[in-house]
Image: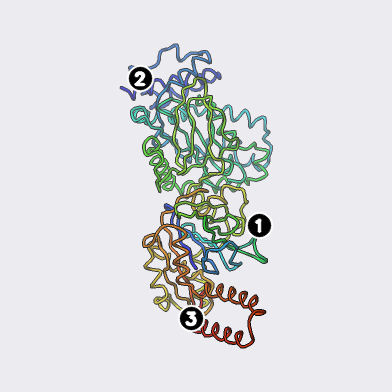
Amino acid sequence: MILLIRSGEFKFGAYLSEPLLISDSWAGGPACFLFSLTLDMKIPYHARDPPEGGRWGPVSFLAGRRELVIGNDDLVLDSTLTSGTSQLEGCFGIGLDRQSSEASTMLAGHSHFEIDDVEVWMVERVERGQHL
Amino acid sequence: MKSSDSHTRVLAAVKSNLAMVGELQVFEQREAGADAASALLGSSEAPAPTSRSSSPRGQGQGQGGQAALSSTGDSGSHSPRSTAHALSSHLHGGPAELVAGQASDTRYAQAVRDFVGEHAQLIQGLLSSGAGAGAEGGAMDSTALPLPPSVCAPSVVGEFYPLRLARSATDGDMHAMAMGSSRSQPLKHTDPRRVFESILKDAVIPPSKAAKGVRGGQQEEYTTTLLDTKETHKSFQSKTLSGSQQLGGDKGQRNAQAPPFAVPSARGPSPGVGASRLVYTQTSQMRVQSEVEGGGFEYSGGDASRVSMPLLALLKLAAQAGQPSLRTQTERKIKQLQTRNVTSFESELHALVKSDILQNDEPQLVYFVLPFLSRPPAVTLIYSTFKHGRSLSDLYLKTNQVCPMISLSYCAVLITLLIYFLFPLLAPHQISSLIFSISIFRIGHL
């Protein structure tokens, strides 16, 4: 699945290797990644600071009822899809300092940002109709 | 008249503050050589001679605090390049000395003090430009001053390092903060000299440390960067001004063109002693709260976790990150797929082109960054805030409708568990019929 977000002049999103189904358990894997269209960069999965309580093995996102958490707070969307937060270098990053302002502003320009638009795209293989 | 009066009062405040630190003569010498300053001095509402002499500290602060003006527009005749050269050469005595590391911290401290005296005209220009508009509008405007990398912290070397200066028209207090750096901190003082001193202390590193991280070649590199990004600086500055114009107006209203500045407060909120404070609202907008309680003023950084970064600094950071860009990866993917152009993916890209968020070549960037090798996947829009309710529940609902397989898998697990517990209670023929029914159910859904 592709998650696209526009926050002001910043466009970014995430590729999720599993569908967004509400759950209390972590899902996804290393195939997931974040990207920023505004900065023209892909933010790969590295899981340097993985979330606690995740299932065995690498995880990427938690589709909760109150918020959608991608990575270890790398990208968090609230339940109303009106605002979010970002702090890279948890599960996704490019080698920044986890606590730096760059890590918290890389995606949206602000650590706490407001969401203008959200789109979710399903990615599936043409031949088998299998979801990627 | 208001504008001239504000200019006069600002000039008097600057002079009194400079006189307070014994640098009035330097200021007056520079002032005499500047046309703009001469024009100000030649006005009919020039400050009284007593204000140009050494005045007591309290008097100087009083005049500075009562001066109601805002600094807008560019920083007078001081271009970023000239300012950068002036700062660098004055503080460190040139790149060669930086590399050699011969300058001592004592000289650095002295250089910081001397800088304020030698650039008093710049201070005056920053304060006096656009003073009338700020006084009449009652808003808080600002201007930006770039510093060269040789006088910045090692973490921001090579970055555009603007500084934001603003004076509240309501209370006349100076606000200053550094932008685009992880070391950005709100700075607060009541007189221009201390503002500049604090800015330099925050942004400038001693030559002994700078010599370790700065090479002689980077000085020239930054000069070139400044020349190349002259227009960028103008647009950046105009963006800052456009954002600051909203400070007194649309408080709390979200704006996509919000002023790009960063104010992480490492010290956290402090008790209100001062007259003005910067407060971050839920929408990360800065607003000024006037609290007339006398004396100086204290900053309240609000939530220290809320940080902003200008787009320009992020673009430079992304360029320095070493990650292949999405465009590069798109080109590589197309080559891997042995296609000469992207026309063969038009059918798959057709849906993404209809996106309300993606524009220009962004659909291609998103599509080709997907993990596939030889079989281009199809993409289908399943949720959009333009078409559906804005909530996570609606998003999950749409996702669940498109992905019944996953739901079915969960159902299968539940049925299996049910059978596991029902087995002891069922006869063999009942178990067989139950498994047969479940199989038919699954095949029907597949």
- Residue that sits furthest to the top in the current view: B50
Residue type (three-letter) at the residue carrying disc 1? Glu
Gap between marks 2 and 1 measured at Cα? 69 Å
The picture quadrant where one finds residue B238 is top left
Above or below — where is B256 with respect to A119? above
Secondary structure beneath label 2: loop
Residue at the image point whose x is 60% and y is 67% from the top: A29
Observer able to see residue B208? yes
Q: Give me the chain letter of mark 3.
A: B
Q: How many other residues sit within 10 Å of disc 3, few (<14), some (14-19) or many (≥20)?
A: few
Above or below — where is A11 with respect to B113? below
Q: Which mark is on residue B42? A: 2
* Left or right side of B100 for B172: left
Residue type (three-letter) at the residue carrying disc 2? Gly
Q: Give me the chain letter of mark 1.
A: A
The picture quadrant where one finds residue B143 is top left
Secondary structure beneath label 3: helix
**Which quarter of the image is occupied by the N terminus of chain B?**
top left
Q: Are marks 3 and 1 on the same chain?
A: no
Disc 1: which residue: A52
The picture quadrant where one finds residue A53 is bottom right
Q: Which mark is on residue B445? A: 3
- Camera-side mark, 2 or 1: 1
Secondary structure beneath label 1: loop
Instruction: Check the image and tell me how it is coloured.
Output: rainbow
CB-based contact (under 8 Å), mark 2 and mark 1: no
Q: Give me the chain letter of mark 2.
A: B
Gap between marks 3 and 1 measured at Cα? 36 Å
